[in-house]
Image: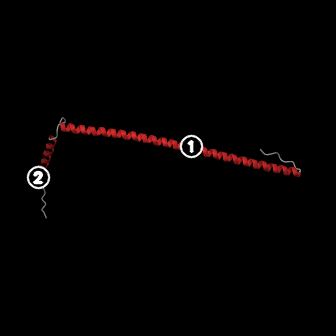
Amino acid sequence: MAIYREKDFNERRNAANEAKKALLAKFKARPADDDPEVLARKAERQAILEARAKRDAEKARLKREKEAREAEARRIAQEKAAAERAQREAEDNERIALQLAEEAARKAKRDARYAARKARNGRMPLPPRP
């Protein structure tokens, strides 16, 4: 097992100074803004940004077109549903009108039988109900 030895103050201070010197050297070694490599990287980043903007614009256009198609499909479906609903209501109204007519015919027959019976028995029938 290795023996652990703590660093004393001087060693820690020297290590910090070396780290500062390394950072300063790294900063000084950085190329200037007018360096061809820096300009090339900057142009490359700009090209990437422009391509990304084009892709985003194309994506947005496709999304708008898709939403327009979906809205049109929803509108058509709603119109179809409204037409079916109107047709069902018309059929229901027709069926109800037919039932009311049949009921009125049955009532008229019943009233006629009642009047005939009253006439046979010699009584005066009541006036018809409205």
Pointer 1 residue: 82
Q: Quadrant of the N terminus?
A: bottom left
Type of amino acid under label 1: Ala
Give the mark nearest the N terminus, 2 or 1: 2
What residue appears at the point 11 percent right and 52 percent down from the top-left corner?
11
Q: Quadrant of residue 41?
A: top left
For residue 57, side relative to residue 42 (left or right): right
Q: Nearer the viewer, residue 121 or 106?
A: 106
Q: CA distance from mark 2 to mark 1?
A: 87 Å
From the top left corner, tell me how far across and down residue 19 is, in percent.
14, 47
From the top left corner, tell me how far across and down residue 29 is, in percent.
14, 41
Query: Which structural element holds mark 2?
Result: helix
Q: Nearer the viewer, residue 66 or 25?
A: 66
Q: Residues within 10 Å of mark 2 (few under 14, many from 20)?
A: few
What residue appears at the point 37 percent right and 41 percent down from the top-left corner?
59
What residue appears at the point 74 percent right and 47 percent down from the top-left corner?
104
Coloring applied to the structure: secondary structure
What residue appears at the point 48 percent right and 41 percent down from the top-left corner?
72
For residue 50, side relative to residue 29 (left or right): right
From the top left corner, tell me how far across and down residue 101 is, in percent.
72, 46
> Seen from this angle, which residue lies furthest top?
34
From the top left corner, tell me how far across and down residue 98 is, in percent.
70, 47
Type of amino acid under label 2: Glu
Pointer 2 residue: 11
> Seen from this angle, which residue lies furthest right?
122
For residue 31, side relative to residue 109 (left or right): left
For residue 56, side relative to residue 72 (left or right): left
Q: Nearer the viewer, residue 120 or 21?
A: 120
Q: Quadrant of residue 56?
A: top left
Query: Which structural element holds mark 1?
Result: helix
Q: Residues within 10 Å of mark 1 (few under 14, many from 20)?
A: few
Q: Quadrant of the C terminus?
A: top right
